[in-house]
Amino acid sequence: MTSSRRKLVVGNWKMHGSRPHNAELLAGIVAARPFGCDVGVCVPFPYLGETAVALAGSDVRWGAQDCSQHAQGAYTGEISASMLAEFGCRYAIVGHSERRALHGEADQVVADKAKAVLGRGLTPIVCVGETLAQREAGEAHAVVKRQLSAVIHTLGHCAGEMVVAYEPVWAIGTGVTATPEQAQEMHALIRAQLHAATEHADVMTLLYGGSVKPDNAARLFAQPDIDGGLVGGASLQVADFVAICRAAG
Ligand code: PEP
């Protein structure tokens, strides 16, 4: 059942950008509408205020790339979900593989972050995905299942409200994209796991991420369980990001 799901394309700027570049990029995205799909950008925290201003009045959404699992307190350097809500964020990415790898974020921490995000009315984009070594060892499904289980268990009856992004680590920033068939296989397994947990699995948005580019987006997005993309590098140039959004529309 794909017809009831509107496609979604979200840009993950990572730690890129500058105020002049962001202004140009956001203006270009706004000017290129309509896309025929939902579109968002997840920007570095300091740029949230000006992103909100630049996108106000448009249907382009914005969000952050991480969120603390804590509501407030002595957590120097952390940003809470209520702070993101104050800046009008629609989304917060949690569990990106770079944070899992570089900041040691365990499955339960990611799950707690997703819960904190949902608790403030934002949508968590929960990233899951296996490394190359895990794929080569035949563990791809088990790894993704374990990562997703923690979130499903922690969110309980709210699990249907998250967006899940399948991002094979070996495809992120490498230029190597999962084939549409590889990506679809994992998305189908993810949706089956969600089916067992929530009656909303059929309407949940499952994104693919990992070297999505203008020339491969359409084939990926045509897969029955792929509802759009989480786009890193190609979200930093107006022409590329717009082309990917058009491929989803
Ligand atoms: C990402 O950072 O989520 C990502 C998918 O990056 P890229 O598109 O550059 O592979």
Image (tube, rainbow, N blue to C red):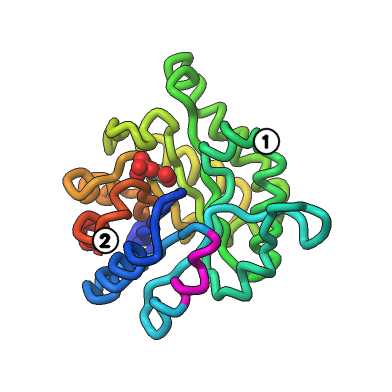
Left or right of residue 202: residue 176: left
Q: CA distance from mark 2 to mark 1?
A: 32 Å
Which disc number belongs to residue 245? 2
At a point 50% along the width and 50% down the height, the residue shown is 164
Secondary structure that dominates the magenta span: helix
Look at label 1 and name its amino acid.
Ala
Nearest to the observer: residue 211 or residue 36: 211
**Residue 1 visible here:** no
At a point 43% along the width and 22% down the height, the residue shown is 132
At a point 66% along the width and 69% down the height, the residue shown is 83
Mark 1 closeness class: few <14, some 14–19, many ≥20 residues within 10 Å: some
**Residue 110 visible here:** yes
Q: Quadrant of the N terminus?
A: bottom left
Q: Secondary structure at mark 1?
A: loop
Q: Quadrant of ligand 1?
A: top left
Residue range highlighted in magenta: 45-52
Q: Which residue is mark 1?
A: 106
Nearest to the observer: residue 57 or residue 78: 78
Residue 146 x %, y %: 62, 33
At a point 39% along the width and 77% down the height, the residue shown is 54
